[in-house]
Amino acid sequence: MQLDRHNDGALFSESKGVILVVEDEPLLRLLAVDFMEEDGFEVVDVGSADEAVSILETRSDIRIVFTDIDMPGSMDGMKLAAAVRDRWPPVEIVVVSGHKRQNDIILPERAVFFPKPYNIEAVTATLNRMASAI
């Protein structure tokens, strides 16, 4: 995270924006959170699409949803992406999967897909592009 100074000299962090990471595999979620925070984003992470919807309903500062497709619960990542586009149209969406390929799915408008294992540099570049367009 980027550190800047207030006029009084105190340090504060300046975030590029808030990303909601939705991943049911704890190690993959931790990896995503780590590289996003290292790049200056504030990250909220959850293990299911149901939890993600609850977060989105209570927080207005989420700018990007980063979601896996295959997850347990009442909805998978594709249904979550569709719900985000329908209920929170300004929120950007990144969809990832280790089992599906881009030709196998229909993404919501403005959503971006990365197959797992994804290239962290490519994902970071996309997140930065999305954050700068907001």
Image: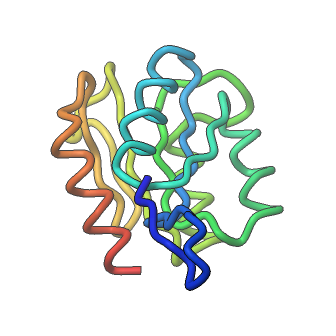
Looking at the picture, how far across and down is residue 77, in whole percent?
A: 53, 39
Q: Is residue 79 above or below residue 86?
A: above
Instruction: Pick the residue in front: 113 or 32.
Output: 32
Residue at image position (24%, 31%) is 115
Q: How is the image coloured?
A: rainbow
Could you say where residue 4 lies in the image, as x and y percent from the top left? 45, 69
> Is residue 35 depicted above or below 125 in this figure?
above
Q: Quadrant of residue 121?
A: top left
Nearer the observer, 78 or 37: 37
Residue 114 point in image, percent of width and height = 25, 39
* Picture residue at 76% right of the left edge, 52% below the top: 55
From this view, report whether residue 121 is shown above or below residue 42. Answer: above
Where in the figure is residue 84, as x and y percent of width and height? 59, 61
Q: Is residue 97 left or right of residue 74?
A: left
Instruction: Judge whether 99 appears above or below 3 on screen.
Output: above
Horizontally, is 20 left or right of 92 in the view?
right
What quarter of the picture does the C terminus occupy?
Answer: bottom left
Asked whether 12 or 31 is in front, the reply is 12
Give the tally of numbered discs: 0
Residue that sits furthest to the front in the current view: 9
Give the quarter of the image for residue 82: bottom right
Determine the residue positioned at 36% across, 54% down: 107
Tell me the quarter of the picture where residue 58 sits: bottom right
| Residue at screen point 49% across, 64% down | 15
